[in-house]
């Protein structure tokens, strides 16, 4: 990272002084460095950056080589339309992390051709290509997907299971371009068939700001497969991009997703995706401010404290500090790091207080969140945790009652001769109003009876009545 920090600072200096390292006197006709001029440049920059001249000269030579490669690539592209694409390979494929890898290709070819070439050259069985945070579709051309000369493309390894799933989806997509719509309709159908019983409840549900956690299997939490994680996170990001601004400003999921993507970049040592990372952290910060308020006042109104969410800001400031450092902006990096140190000190917990709470029968998670919510006051933490437990129990009790009432209503409508599926749909359309649901079912049955009377016996439709399509409504999140 120190090398990238120095490189960024040198590039800024070179840009300010309009120095072009790829032409004389810094580069000779045979592409060798103009040694004397490079040394002079290094000796001039070294005291300005407080770095030894030899280290500056080495960094300048690296910049010069990349500039020559880029200049030659531009010439080749103009003459032959063959582009040079930089590959950000998985860590296991990097024999020398400092050496950049390039792929020469035309841009009017399918991405699958590039996938095959990369896989064969680097011995990678299953891979995905990521450009600016988006997965390239194998069945589309590179230029159509905004791949340009000198683009940086990240290569992610994909597990056998995910690859098979991806292939299956691609085959299905080829058969029907309306696959996405079909999946959406299927999702609505599943939701409409819920009758309140446990076996019809979805595995994942959206949590509110009180933080009821998703039930992720323990073994899945222990795996640190950042390649696979980044693939899924980027897919989620594409789906979030389809949501309206009203939804994104009311929940923090989108902001947390941006943090997770940049965190995965860091874990994969792919922080050369600097511009995409900075943009995502900016989105995350803006989203947090909209959801929580400028001084987290909205969060405190809802929850009474902000201890848990402050950890998210800790991650945000830490990543911002890291990217600023890699960008050569030491001042901004120090400012963000100062915020990290202040937050970390406030969030650090007394191990003895943790032990006391655990000995009282609370889980480590409850103890940690309780102490953070009460600024380390153990008595208040006990009260806070107890209140949280009672609130969760009340919420669960209300949900069980709601489901039981819904199941009873569906059963009542089913006793009148309607299928449970149609009864559930009608109840959903009627927003839980039993009389309105009954009327919907009766109107549907009457309409079908009228239609059947106009048909010949051979052409009569014997299907069960289905409620009319629901009116378009805005979902309440």
Image (tube, grey):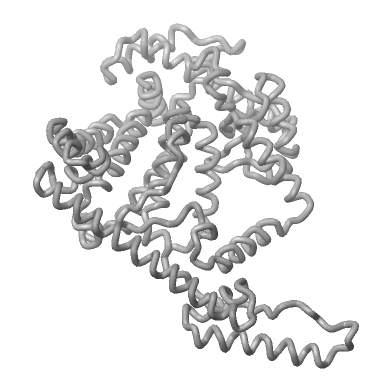
Q: Residue at x 43, y 31 (%)?
A: 222
Q: Which quadrant of the view contains residue 194? A: bottom right
x, y percent for residue 356: 14, 36
Q: Is residue 452 above or below residue 35?
A: below
Given residues 106 and 399, the one toward you in this image is: 399
Q: Residue at x 80, y 81 (%)?
A: 461
x, y percent for residue 73: 64, 26
Given residues 318 and 438, the one toward you in this image is: 438
x, y percent for residue 288: 32, 52
x, y percent for residue 369: 23, 44
Which image quadrant: the N terminus?
A: top left
Answer left or right for 34 relative to 304. right
Q: Residue at x 24, y 44 (%)?
A: 366
Say whether residue 101 is visible.
Answer: yes
Answer left or right for 408 relative to 449. left
Given residues 256 and 33, the one toward you in this image is: 256
Which image quadrant: the C terminus?
A: bottom left
Say whether residue 338 is visible.
Answer: no
Count the labels in the image. Answer: 0
Q: Residue at x 12, y 41 (%)?
A: 376
Answer left or right for 51 relative to 141. left
Given residues 156 and 208, the one toward you in this image is: 208
Q: Is residue 22 above or below residue 81?
A: above
State the residue lying farthest toward the front: 415
């Amino acid at each position: 990272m120190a090398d990238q920090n120095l490189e960024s600072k040198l590039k800024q200096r070179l840009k300010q002084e309009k120095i072009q390292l790829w032409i004389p006197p810094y580069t000779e006709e045979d592409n060798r460095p103009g040694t004397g001029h490079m040394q002079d440049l290094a000796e001039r920059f070294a005291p300005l950056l407080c770095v030894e001249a030899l280290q500056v000269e080495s960094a300048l030579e690296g910049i010069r080589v990349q500039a020559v490669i880029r200049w030659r690539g531009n010439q080749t592209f103009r003459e032959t339309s063959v582009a040079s694409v930089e590959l950000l390979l998985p860590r296991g494929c990097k024999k020398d992390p400092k050496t950049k890898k390039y792929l020469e290709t035309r841009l009017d070819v399918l991405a699958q051709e590039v996938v095959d070439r990369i896989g064969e050259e680097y011995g990678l069985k299953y891979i995905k290509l990521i450009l600016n945070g988006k997965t390239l579709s194998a069945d589309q051309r590179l230029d159509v997907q905004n791949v340009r000369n000198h683009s940086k493309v990240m290569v992610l390894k994909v597990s056998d299971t995910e690859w098979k799933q991806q292939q299956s989806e691609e085959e299905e997509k080829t058969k029907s371009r309306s696959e996405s719509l079909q999946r959406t309709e299927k999702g609505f159908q599943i939701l409409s068939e819920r009758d309140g019983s446990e076996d019809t409840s979805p595995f994942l549900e959206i949590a509110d700001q009180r933080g009821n956690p998703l039930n992720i299997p323990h073994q899945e939490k222990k795996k640190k497969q950042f390649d696979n994680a980044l693939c899924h996170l980027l897919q989620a990001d594409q789906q979030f991009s389809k949501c309206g601004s009203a939804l994104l400003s009311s929940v923090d999921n989108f902001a947390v997703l941006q943090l997770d993507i940049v965190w995965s970049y860091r874990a994969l040592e792919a922080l050369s995706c600097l511009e995409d990372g900075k943009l995502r952290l900016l989105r995350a910060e803006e989203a947090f401010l909209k959801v929580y308020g400028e001084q987290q006042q909205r969060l405190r109104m809802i929850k009474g404290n902000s201890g848990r969410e402050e950890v998210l800001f800790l991650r945000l400031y830490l990543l911002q500090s890291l990217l600023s450092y890699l960008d050569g902006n030491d001042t901004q990096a120090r400012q963000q790091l100062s915020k990290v140190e202040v937050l970390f000190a406030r969030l650090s917990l007394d191990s003895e207080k943790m032990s006391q709470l655990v000995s009282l029968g609370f889980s480590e998670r409850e103890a940690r969140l309780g102490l953070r919510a009460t600024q380390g006051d153990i008595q208040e933490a006990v009260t806070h945790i107890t209140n949280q437990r009672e609130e969760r129990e009340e919420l669960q009790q209300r949900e069980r009652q709601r489901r039981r009432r819904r199941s009873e209503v569906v059963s009542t409508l089913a006793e009148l001769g309607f299928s449970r599926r149609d009864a559930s749909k009608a109840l959903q359309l009627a927003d839980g109003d039993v009389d309105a649901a009954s009327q919907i079912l009766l109107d549907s049955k009457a309409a079908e009876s009228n239609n059947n009377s106009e048909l010949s016996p051979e052409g009569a439709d014997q299907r069960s009545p289905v409620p009319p399509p629901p009116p378009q409504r805005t979902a309440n999140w």
